[in-house]
């Protein structure tokens, strides 16, 4: 590759100053940072469906959803799972349904184009289970083709191989309300009434409303489902009413004072559907709070209305603090102090679902969202601790006590294989992903390399320690997760660039000489997948096609991750990929916009690999600033 001109010191300083100025300008008055969490259109489409079912659509600006959906439709007629993916079937069916619910006729040119796209890909019968479930709610699909969820699941004890606490936190908070919905199997009248007969490729009279077969051992679950459905038809479901009551109680206990459930829209929408099935009134305070919580996730502009899957103020705030300090802002700057004290107030001191399997741990973690007492997570907690450690607050003793409490909680969450998961302990029964209901392959929350690396980075960056044997278990797990090419898988970010950067940042701080070879192999892989323009990029498709590891259009966030990882690796081993680093820095400086920001259309965050992706609108801001700041510090120390 041809070497690009080296960026001058004053250019880097100017880029840092412009970036800092932008971030400081968007801080909220109470001290936090928070930007849009963009996903695909299904979240908004399902919100439209919910309001139609509750009859609350007329008091919300849902007419603006039409403009949003039209903007998001691509030239091929479909809607995307992530930017540039060529369109996705289930996403497109849900968008089409929402437009029809909003009164757009099937003869509209956009609908004709969408219908062609959908039918080419197999129509409704080939969609995911959750799409079919939503269509069944309004009579556009039969409940016969939706998996049964018997309410007695609520009574299976934690020691039983399958119970609600063996599901991931997001699956659990979404599934418990669906126990009620799938028991009732409602078909809600809506206005205007619609059908989607035109989206069945085989013709509505030829539809086989049944669960698809795989031709392997997992078809055993289809036999079980047939048994469940037979028991339902004969009214022989054991503990049915008791299970419904237990599910209702579980839902009500986990509603936040703000109305949220689980901090995620699927759990919130499903809980609201469950309450509708149970006959709750739209003026019930629980319902009003729930609907308001969904409204709080919405973004309204002059012309459009859309709903986010989640919100990320804790995550964004912690990373911005790190970026500002890493790039030279004083640790006791008033902006940093205000943000740090806001984070301290958000520490969760209540027991959550994690305590069911973790009997030793005591509260002290942070969540992702404004309010989510039941589901704090390891990743957020580790990043917050690193942000607070870097900041200098008026009450340092209080800060240190909060960090110590967080460390103890994180240490108690270490999984048996040696790593850490996001929300739960030893939530790793992979066979649950094979049940018909689990077709998103997101039923569990096993330990992962990226979260484990974050914990180890926290230990090294904050001079913290855990039991030596447990530290070694974590390192062994992490090294065993290294791919043959030298990279690491990224569960929560796209993908191997994210994972590799995180692990290099961790190993560089934890006995780096002992793991020198692993670090060098990771750094070499990053150098090898650098793009000709000096940046790095990786497509979300790398989750489905490993040959696409490290390949994709350059983005600011992924370039920053690579630079951060390479700087850490070079400082740890003394073997510095200086040319690659400088070309990456050159890319960041060259692509920065006049107002100090960066822009990327690509999705670089991951919800469920292969099925749900996220564009964090601040990733393209604070990660480049961290990279520039660390490069500036590195150059200054040479």
Image: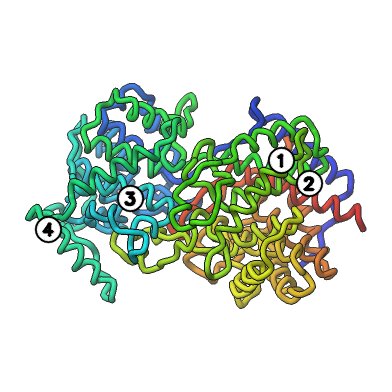
Q: Does residue 269 appear anywhere in the picture?
A: yes
Name which of mark 4 and mark 2 comes first in the sequence.
4
From the image, state whether disc 1 or disc 4 is nearer to you.
1
The residue carrying mark 1 is: 399
Task: Indicate whether 318 appears above or below 453.
Answer: above
x, y percent for residue 35: 58, 37
Query: Which disc number belongs to residue 231?
Result: 4
SS for dot 1: helix
Q: Pick whichever of labels 3 and 1 is earlier in the sequence.
A: 3
Q: Which residue is mark 2?
A: 326
In the picture, which quadrant includes the N terminus?
A: bottom right
The residue carrying pointer 3 sits among few (fewer than 14), some (14 to 19) or many (20 or more) residues within 10 Å by Cα, namely many
User: Does the residue at mark 1 contact the one at mark 2 (Cβ under 8 Å)?
Assistant: no
* Image quadrant where residue 527 sits: bottom right
**Residue 376: where, in percent of width, then height?**
53, 47
Residue 532: x and y in percent read: 71, 62
Q: Earlier in the sequence, mark 2 or mark 3?
A: 3
Between the C-alphas of marks 1 and 4, the distance is 56 Å
Depth check: 572 or 483 in front?
Answer: 572
Mark 3 vs mark 1: give the one in front. Answer: 1
The mark nearer the N terminus, 1 or 4, is 4
Q: Nearer the viewer, mark 4 or mark 2?
A: 4
């Amino acid at each position: 590759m041809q070497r690009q001109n080296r960026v001058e010191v004053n250019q880097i300083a100017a880029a840092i100053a412009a970036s800092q100025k932008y971030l400081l300008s968007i801080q909220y008055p109470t001290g936090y940072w928070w930007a849009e969490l963009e996903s695909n259109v299904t979240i908004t489409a399902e919100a439209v469906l919910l309001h139609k079912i509750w009859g609350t659509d007329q008091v919300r600006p849902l007419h603006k959803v039409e403009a949003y959906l039209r903007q998001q439709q691509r030239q091929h007629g479909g809607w995307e799972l992530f930017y540039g993916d060529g369109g996705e079937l289930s996403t497109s069916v849900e968008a089409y349904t929402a437009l029809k619910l909003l009164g757009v006729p099937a003869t509209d040119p956009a609908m004709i184009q969408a219908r062609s796209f959908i039918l080419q890909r197999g129509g409704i019968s080939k969609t995911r289970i959750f799409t079919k479930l939503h269509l069944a709610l309004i009579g556009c699909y039969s409940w016969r083709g939706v998996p049964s969820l018997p309410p007695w699941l609520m009574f299976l004890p934690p020691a039983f191989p399958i119970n609600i606490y063996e599901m991931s936190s997001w699956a659990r908070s979404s599934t418990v309300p669906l126990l009620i919905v799938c028991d009732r199997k409602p078909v809600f009248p809506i206005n205007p009434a619609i059908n989607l007969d035109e989206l069945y490729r085989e013709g509505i009279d030829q539809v086989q409303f049944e669960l698809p077969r795989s031709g392997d051992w997992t078809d055993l679950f289809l036999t079980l489902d047939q048994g469940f459905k037979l028991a339902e038809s004969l009214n022989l479901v054991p503990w049915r009413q008791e299970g419904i009551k237990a599910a209702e109680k579980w839902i009500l206990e986990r509603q936040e004072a703000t109305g949220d459930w689980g901090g995620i829209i699927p759990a919130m929408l499903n809980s609201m559907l469950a309450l509708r099935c149970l006959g709750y009134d739209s003026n019930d305070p629980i319902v009003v709070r729930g609907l308001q919580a969904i409204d709080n996730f919405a973004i309204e502009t002059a012309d459009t209305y859309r709903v986010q899957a989640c919100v990320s103020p804790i995550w964004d705030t912690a990373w911005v603090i790190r970026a500002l300090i890493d790039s030279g802002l004083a640790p006791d700057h008033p902006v940093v102090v205000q943000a740090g004290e806001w984070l301290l107030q958000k520490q969760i001191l209540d027991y959550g679902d994690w305590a069911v399997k973790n009997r030793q741990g005591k509260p002290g973690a942070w969540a992702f969202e404004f309010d989510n007492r039941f589901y704090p997570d390891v990743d957020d907690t580790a990043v917050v601790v690193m942000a607070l450690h870097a900041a200098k607050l008026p009450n340092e003793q209080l800060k240190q006590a909060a960090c110590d409490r967080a460390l103890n909680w994180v240490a108690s969450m270490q999984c048996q294989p040696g790593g850490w998961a996001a929300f739960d302990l030893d939530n790793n029964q992979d066979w649950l992903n094979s049940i018909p209901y689990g077709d998103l392959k997101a039923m569990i929350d096993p330990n992962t390399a990226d979260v484990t690396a974050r914990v180890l980075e926290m230990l090294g960056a904050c001079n913290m320690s855990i039991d030596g044997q447990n530290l070694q278990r974590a390192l062994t797990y992490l090294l065993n997760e290294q791919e043959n090419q030298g990279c690491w898988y990224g569960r929560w970010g796209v993908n191997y660039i994210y994972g590799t950067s995180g692990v290099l940042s961790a190993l560089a701080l934890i006995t780096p000489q002992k793991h020198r070879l692993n670090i060098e192999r990771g750094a070499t892989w990053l150098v090898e997948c650098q793009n000709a323009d000096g940046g790095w990029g990786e497509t979300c498709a790398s989750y489905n096609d490993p040959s696409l590891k490290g390949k994709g259009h350059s983005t600011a966030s992924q370039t920053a991750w690579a630079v951060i990882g390479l700087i850490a690796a070079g400082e740890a081993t003394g073997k510095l990929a200086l040319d690659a680093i400088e070309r990456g820095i050159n890319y960041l400086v060259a692509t920065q916009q006049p107002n100090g920001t960066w822009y990327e259309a690509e999705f670089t965050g991951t919800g469920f690999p292969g099925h749900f992706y996220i564009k964090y609108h601040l990733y393209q801001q604070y990660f480049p600033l961290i990279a520039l700041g660390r490069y500036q510090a590195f150059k200054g120390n040479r």
